[in-house]
Image (cartoon, rainbow, N blue to C red):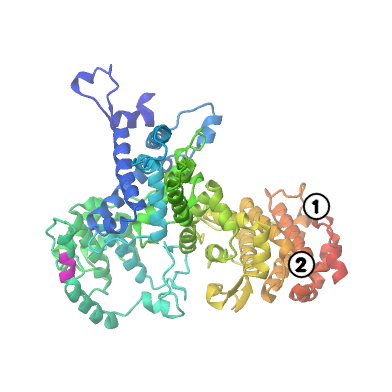
Amino acid sequence: SLEHDTNYIIKETFTYRSRDEMDGQNNGQDTALEIIAAIMAFLSSLGHIIRQGKHSDILAIPEMYDVIVQIFSLLLVLLSTQLYQPLVSSAELEIEGGRPSSHFFLEKMMDYSHWQRQRSKEEHTQKEERMRQQQAQSLGQENDNAEPSSSSSLHNEPLLFLHSCLRWLIDRPSPPRRSIAFHYVDLPKSIAQQMTNMVVAPDGMYESHTIVMASVPGDDVSKGANATSSLRKSSQSSNASLKGTLDATSQSHQTTSVALGTDDTVDISSPGHVSGDITSWNTPSNLLFHPIRSILLLSSTFFLLPIRLVRLAFTLFGHSQHRAIMGGSGSFHMKNLADGDRLILQQLQAHCEKQSCWNKTNNILWLSDSPIADLGSALMLILSNNCRSRGSHPFRSELASLNDNRWDKEISENKSKVENSMFPWTSNIDDHMSVLSVNFESLFEAFGRIVHTEVGALSLYTLLLSSPTFAESLSARSDLDTLVMPLLRSLYFSTTTTHHVDPSSKSKNGPISQLITLKDRPFRSQSQLYVILILLLIFSEDPSFGRDSFRRVRVSSPTVKWYKERHIKQASLGSMILLVLLKAITFDLNRLQDGFLLSNCCAVMLNLSPHIADLHEYVAARLVSVTTSCFKRYATLVAENGGEPELEEGDLSTLLGMHGETCRTLLSLIKHSIRRKCLEKNIHLVYALLLEQRDIQKMYQYASLGDLSPISSLI
């Protein structure tokens, strides 16, 4: 019925009708479309400013930065209706006979963006036609008309929106100090600094999936063991210098506030801002209430307060909301809190969200340095990966035309030469102004800083599939370790768990292989692991990547300090890929038993197998060790199956099939590595095989593992 139709309810809610239109004869005014049009007009105006290189001045205004963050947040809610219901892709809707989609605002956005893009193309074509006619009439005369694509690109709102998102992904503009977004960034950082059980690695990042840094810290943070102390400075050493700096800059902040046109009367030295007495900032209560108080003072509304983040802070400090308000042993006593803090606690108690069981992923603490960049990347992913069954996707089409703007200067010079010649300039020389273009070198470096996150990995995956030009530029690079090493680091910690199985427990199938629970999984969701492995699979499909990863690209100790099982001073990039994949396979077989995850791990290994050379001694030992341990489990499963192997090779639906496929893949790697032309380069693997020759010889009895004559002849 219509009363329970989500689309109908939302449509009626966002339809304005006057009293004369209440009879239903008139469809009314579509305010949903007007909201989308107003937001896109504002964002496209920003995009036009960004293309002119003036965005830094705009984002320096605190109010402007906060407005963009709030608009992005609003769009994210309006377009993410698939998060509140079972996910059904547009392709599935088409297969099911055109069942209507319930993504009301997403459909509106696509329709509006498609219309805007078509309008821009038509206007561009008309202006080119008029210019050709004028040039035909007055050949040799100077043409004072404006560049056609320059003006039409202003109306191509999908292009300008994507350009803004990509530009902010590269630059990652930080929020101004007096903005609400600044305190949004400050609150989770204050919480993370109090998590004493969370280890900070020498590279300045956390060794846990529960705290995710949106961007890799700078070089000043990631030098040796000083990273830990730089993130957790003692208050005795920092308060004096910080207070002096704040006293010196207080007047300059006030002057900047007036110069930028802010009309609020909140004094920079009032409670909730950075000035004043900071000697007690390091206490848990002040670390929590300082950013909360600032958000309330700047926004004058409670609804901008991140409730879930504040609840996490209370949980972290070991105090429930009730105890924090009422006092008691171990709680924040009310007599120690200011009046404003007491009011905040009472509001938190009254507006606290209730626990729900719908969430199937693990929550994380997101430490962002640029909310605009993160929200823009999320919106770009939503708009480019939904409604793809359409004939012409406005955002996907713009991404397909993505070009490297490093050649724009050369194009402009050629255009200038043509304009000064006797021949009229043609439109194809000026087309670079009407297509999406960014600096590919800067984009590559930006992905190196954010690809370890789920948003960064998905953004890279989307661009690789959407833009052939960007994919070709990556395939020509020899420094892909900039992207691969952060992916390996995320995969490593996502397959590391401290929750071990009780070795004394047994099952009817022998030693137990207990599946890990959702709560104990060392990652936010399994889809995050899928994206990492698919990116590695895309890279490994290029033969040049396999050759370079083993022969040219070397990683040294500072880069792989996150690997805990063994101190690796130097190894090839290919050796590190195999080492982390072996860990992922072991984790999957023992704790996840995910066939899709296993198949991607095996596919990456098989793509790299023809190029294995100079294998690191520890990686060679791990390869043989994992092969023999997997074979022992496989032999046990075959015996329990009546001596019969799996019915079909490659069948990963059973535990027997998963172990059989893993054994065949690892043995294939070994056979490729001990070929005659590779034998001397993989001498460490030969030693490892000889050490485990007793277990290796037992494999000869299993025909399902394939031809093992190269290994047997070597031994």
Q: In this view, does 327 lie above or below 616?
A: above
**Labels in figure, total:** 2
Where is residue 670? Give x, y as percent: 76, 65
Q: Is residue 367 above or below residue 400?
A: below
Q: Give the range drawn in magenta.
A: 251-255
Tell me the tag on residue 437. Answer: none
Examine the image and state in which quarter residue 576 appears: bottom right
Q: Name the residue under label 1.
A: 642
Q: Callout 1, which amino acid?
A: Gly
Q: In this view, does 401 lie above or below 610?
A: above
Q: Mark 2 points at which residue?
A: 673
- Kindly give the residue lying farthest to the bottom in the view shown: 237
Q: Callout 2, which amino acid?
A: Ser
State left or right for residue 5 relative to residue 648: left
Work out whether residue 23 or residue 631 is closer to the camera in this orientation and state it: 23
Secondary structure mostly seen in the magenta stretch: helix
Where is residue 487? Give x, y as percent: 54, 62
Can I make out residue 180 in this image? yes
**Residue depicted at 28% across the width and 57% down the height:** 59
Where is residue 151? Give x, y as percent: 35, 41
Mark-to-mark CA distance, 2 and 1? 34 Å
